[in-house]
Amino acid sequence: MKIVNTFKLFLLMGLFLTVCSCQKQQENKTNRGQVHCVDNFENVLDISFTPVKPYDIKHTLFSDQGAWHAYAVPSDSRYYGGFTGPMVMSMYGEWLSKGFAQWNIIEDNQSLDWSKSIRSVRYLPGSIVQTYLLDGLDIEQTLVFSDHRTSMIRTVFKNEGNKARNLNLTLSGTLWSSKQTISSNSRGEMVVNIKDHHSYLVQDVVPMSDNLKISTQDSSYVMRWNHQKVKRNDSLVFVMTQHYQFKEEPRYSYHKDFTVMETENQKRWNGYLCKYFNRESRLLKDTSNIKIAVKSIMTLVTNYRSKAGDLKHAGTFPSVSYQGFYGFWSWDSWKHAVAYSYFEPQMAKDNLRSMFDYQDDRGMVADCIYYNSKENNWRDTKPPLAAWAVAKIFDATKDTSFVEEMLPRLIKYHHWWYTDRDHDNNGLCEYGSTDGTRIAAAWESGMDNAVRFDHAEMIQNRDKAWSLDQESVDLNCYLYYDKKMISYLENVLQIKKPSLTAIGTSDLRTMIRQLMFDKEEGFYFDIDLEKKKQIPIYGPEGWIPLWSEVATKEEAISIVKNIMDTTKFNTYIPCPTLDASHPKFNPLKGYWRGPVWLDQAYFAIKGMYKYGYDDKAIVLTENIMNHCQGLKDRAPIRENYHPITGEGLNAIGFSWSSAHLLMLLRESK
């Protein structure tokens, strides 16, 4: 039952070429000894974890196929013989059990002690494999997801001893919460009713032999297979299915041959890797960077959720390991979609669709949406990067039907900014809110507590439309780039009459340059609406004119000089969200007052490439890869990082950090 790890013999420096070549090899091999490219990436993340309470989810978890449940492997030996979990989701994450399906082996009236076994864990892209050597038994457990609601676990007990064995086996579990109940049905399935999540879990095990005995009591169950005779070098094989779905969904029966499903799963994951690594990239010649890329793909896919409840299309949580992030956010979704376009365009498309499903009549897109749409946040939206994402998806797929589907929505969203967020109708927009609150207006920028907004106040434009009293350089640069991308998409569809007539692209670029660039400081700044003066705060907004191609070549010289200044932005990890010399610079307490957010670092570095500063861009990218704590070991990818120490900060397993790592590595020159 061992997987042959052929590619471990190859030189790692050729790893990404191996990824792409293995797909064809796999298609011609269907046995367990086939070549698996995913085997090159064993344990790039530490998946070992035993929670101490039901809501303890701050660790690396594994999910796939958009399922709404996840797993880890036990770090506590008392729970060996099974997987940690499952953890289930809707508005929050909750462990059903420390180990809901745990095997026990009884021989000669004594239970074998799992803690004395020799154990190994292989967390691979798309699967977890645990192996144990326990008193002459070679035990292998493989966990994969077979669809968007179903996980499957195969457990193989192989007798490696010198004589036949007579084993009594039990599979058991205990629920953590009294709000959950367990029962068995006539088909021998365990059914868990999960009240708070309006969902249920169905577990069945094959084979259902005649000597199987099932008992349940309140919140626990035991399944018993007595007198299982195993000859020398022979095996017992059990396949368990855990099917987690929501009560409003029609129940469907799902059974699939595990070996067939496992082969399909490996082919799918090999396809992800092959597609991502199909482009030459300077930084992807480094094996440690290749592993960072794979870790990023694994993180994104674990955070990917299929449609459920009021979510009409699939999308991506910012982090499955943080209770506050169980929804889809708009500008997160735009960024996720760009990264998905590299390896799975269908995921990319649904990330866009999920947000535009809730576009209102005025054209606004909600800040975030949830399983329960009553929780959707309509107080604000997020920066307009959706057209960029659609253009990236088209570049990857050449799918004009998707462009036709999205273009009217993009145009409507673009016009909304000028009707609801341009207070003086001068063609320069402001961040704002629908409820007149300053906090929601700051959220709309995506930079919640940025120093540049410290003295901003709210002004009303119309009913349910308020603005901050400052015109933001990043917003108007995004809108400029939005115009370019919409024009590009119109050209794709051969639309001759431009749709964006409110203000021309070149006119907007001229206004941004003339009003927001400070020649003496060599940087772009927001404008105070009343005083008509620049707000001289050095932050990421000042380099967005590079990424959006607003800046002139002469302006780029001084912007790059500021980025490369070690007293401002060229810190241990480069591109912090506030000038490091500013008195309010505080990475540990200031969410957007100093930490490095990798999306903003990407905009700086990508902008430098666009203006020909390739070598400097590479240096900054290498500093990110080398200095962000945990990137090159088994630690999870963090929400943001301390620019001076490299420490990972805030949420773990963060999606847009992963997305921008994929961009930085793939797009390096």
Image (cartoon, rainbow, N blue to C red):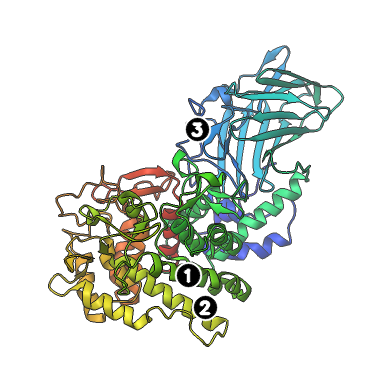
Q: Position of residue 114 (x, y in %)?
A: 60, 23
Which one is earlier in the sequence, the residue at label 3 or at label 2?
3
Give the foreground label among 3 and 1.
1
Numbered disc 2: secondary structure? helix
Check the image and name the residue furthest to the front.
463
What amino acid type is highlighted by mark number 3? Phe
Residue 284 vs 295, above or below: the answer is below
Q: Nearer the viewer, residue 29 or 323?
A: 323
Numbered disc 3: secondary structure? loop
Q: CA distance from mark 3 to mark 2?
A: 46 Å
Q: Please identify the quarter of the rendering in which residue 149 is found.
A: top right
Which one is earlier in the sequence, the residue at label 2 or at label 1?
1
What amino acid type is highlighted by mark number 1? Ala
Q: Nearer the viewer, residue 289 or 641?
A: 641
Q: Position of residue 201 (x, y in %)?
A: 68, 34
Residue at position x 47%, y 55% from top? 366
Residue at position x 65%, y 44% from top? 144
Residue 443 vs 254, above or below: the answer is below
Q: CA distance from mark 3 to mark 1?
A: 40 Å
Residue at position x 60%, y 36% from top? 130
Residue placed under numbered mark 3 in the picture = 49
Would residue 19 be seen by someone viewing this image from the given angle? Answer: no
What amino acid type is highlighted by mark number 2? Leu
Q: Position of residue 382 (x, y in %)?
A: 41, 58
